[in-house]
Amino acid sequence: MKIKRVFILDLASLGIGESADANRFDSVGADTLGHVFEDASLDINLPTLTELGLGNIRYQNPIAQIPEVDNPLGSYGKIQIAAPNNQVTTGLREMLDYQAEARTTSVLDSVAEVDPLDNKVIILSNYQSYFSNQLQSQNIHVNDDTSVWWSLHREAIRQQSGVVYARMSGLDHLAHDGKKESYLGELSKIDGNIQRLMNEMFSTDMLIITSSFANDMRSPLPVTREYLPLIGYLPSGRVGKSLGIRRSLGDIGATLAELFNVEVADNNIGHSFLREFL
């Protein structure tokens, strides 16, 4: 199967439980998703993410409203940050960036450079300062997640090659404010928009859903050290499979590099999951 375009949804702040090194970052017991759903009587569910396999990732620590499914639509796993620090930008850099000879660039720029005529790389984010040096990418500043989704749906219905990276910031703002009910409501909106995006995708598209960092609102820390969700979806209707535990967010960048024939440095820490996914 020839994949020509990849959508990356970065649901910033959505952790799924303490990572193996949580003790080094004062994050023992952190569980962003588990804690917002801790009241089992809450009548809120995420049907699309559930069907994609979000509950399958948490089979050892299930959430009543997000059950494990027998035949998930997506391939699923959990992924952790390998870097020895834990800031808002740490995971994002690990996911997309590496050092080029001349300047700091990212795999997004490299995808565009491989085939400037066909590959279109779009960044949808209100976090433009971090992406300002990605000179080959089209950076679209968005003020809120409603604008992100509007732009994302507009791009989805255009048949195109390349990458669309969309960073959702609403969940993080709500986590910082400790607004659990609003956080759940925002997750529900995201779930509906993911379903719409899946309906808009072409057969040559691929969807990756993840998060660049976690923010458990129970913690006084702005960033908690947790495993992050990893879900991959193809519109082919095939049953998904487990991607296991990934040891670096760089695996996403490595997967993009393999898919678009980007040459990476020998010391790159990421390992592509493309062949496992396909």
Image (cartoon, rainbow, N blue to C red):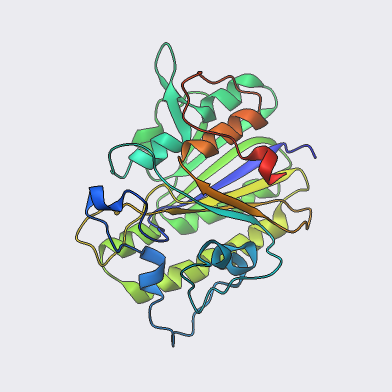
Please tell me in which quadrant of the rendered image residue 85 appears. top left
> From the viewer's perspective, is residue 216 above or below residue 260?
below
Question: Quarter holding the N terminus?
Answer: top right
The residue at the point 55 percent across, 72 percent down is: 46
- Along the line of sight, which residue is nearer the eye, 39 or 26? 26
The total of numbered circles placed on residues is: 0
Residue 243 position in % (x across, y down): 60, 50
Residue 156 position in % (x across, y down): 66, 48
Farthest residue, direction left: 220
> From the viewer's perspective, is residue 257 above or below residue 172?
above
- Along the line of sight, which residue is nearer the eye, 206 or 227? 227
Question: Quarter holding the C terminus?
Answer: top right
Residue 146 position in % (x across, y down): 48, 59
Farthest residue, direction bottom: 41
Please tell me in which quadrant of the rendered image residue 145 appears. bottom left
- The answer to whether residue 207 is left or right of residue 96 is right
- Along the line of sight, which residue is nearer the eye, 244 or 105? 244
The residue at the point 51 percent across, 78 percent down is: 65
Residue 276 position in % (x across, y down): 67, 43
The residue at the point 37 percent across, 53 percent down is: 19
Please tell me in which quadrant of the rendered image residue 4 appears. top right
